[in-house]
Image (cartoon, rainbow, N blue to C red):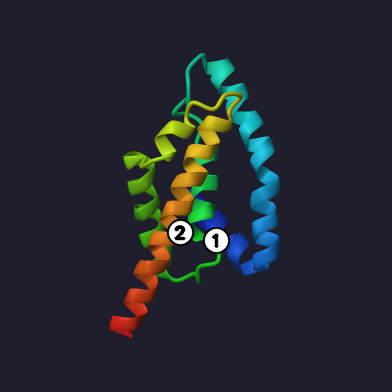
Amino acid sequence: MAAIPLYLLLHYYLSLPFYLLLLIFSLYPVAALCHWAEVYFAQEDPSRVVIDEVIGYLVTMAALPASWFTVISGFFIFRFFDVLKPYPVYQSQQISQGWGVLIDDVLAGIYSNLSLWLVYLGYRHFII
């Protein structure tokens, strides 16, 4: 849930191009941090490290309008895809050096973003 305030802060203070650039440029340092955590805690994808989940949520919310509907729906849709791990999300966990820890959440975020767009557009079309 800590990703929600961060998303709102970035959404309101950065334009979409800068938001996307920040996401792209954060991938390498986050992958390095995930690799370090795997070595330090001596386990794959340690549950104490959630920065990969934050990146996944930020990918989920990219280019979407910030409303209570999208923010809350995005959180639950991201969690759904992060747990379900459809192809190739599950397979991406095999990538080494911390990238697998990160990429599975980025891919889940992409699935979530596309799904949330469908939900959002359907909601706007039928409700509003």
Q: Earlier in the sequence, mark 1 or mark 2?
A: 1
User: Which residue sits at x=63%, y=37%?
Assistant: 30
- Report the quarter where the C terminus lies: bottom left
Q: Secondary structure at mark 2?
A: helix
What amino acid is labelled 2 in the image?
Answer: Asn
User: Which residue sits at x=58%, y=32%?
Assistant: 99
Using residue 35 as the reference point, say whether residue 3 is left or right of it. left
For this orientation, the residue located farthest to the bottom is: 128
User: Which residue sits at x=33%, y=48%?
Assistant: 80
**91 over 68 or under it: above or below:** above
Using residue 20 as the reference point, say whether residue 5 is left or right of it. left
**126 over 110 or under it: above or below:** below
Q: Position of residue 65 (x, y in %)?
A: 50, 71
The answer to the question of whether label 1 and label 2 lie on touching residues, with beta carbons closer than 8 A, is yes
Please rate how many residues cluster around mark 1, counting C-alpha atoms within 10 Å: few if below 14, some from 14 to 19, many from 20: some
Q: Position of residue 16 (x, y in %)?
A: 64, 66
Q: Which residue is mark 2?
A: 113
* Residue at mark 1 to residue at mark 2: CA–CA distance: 7 Å
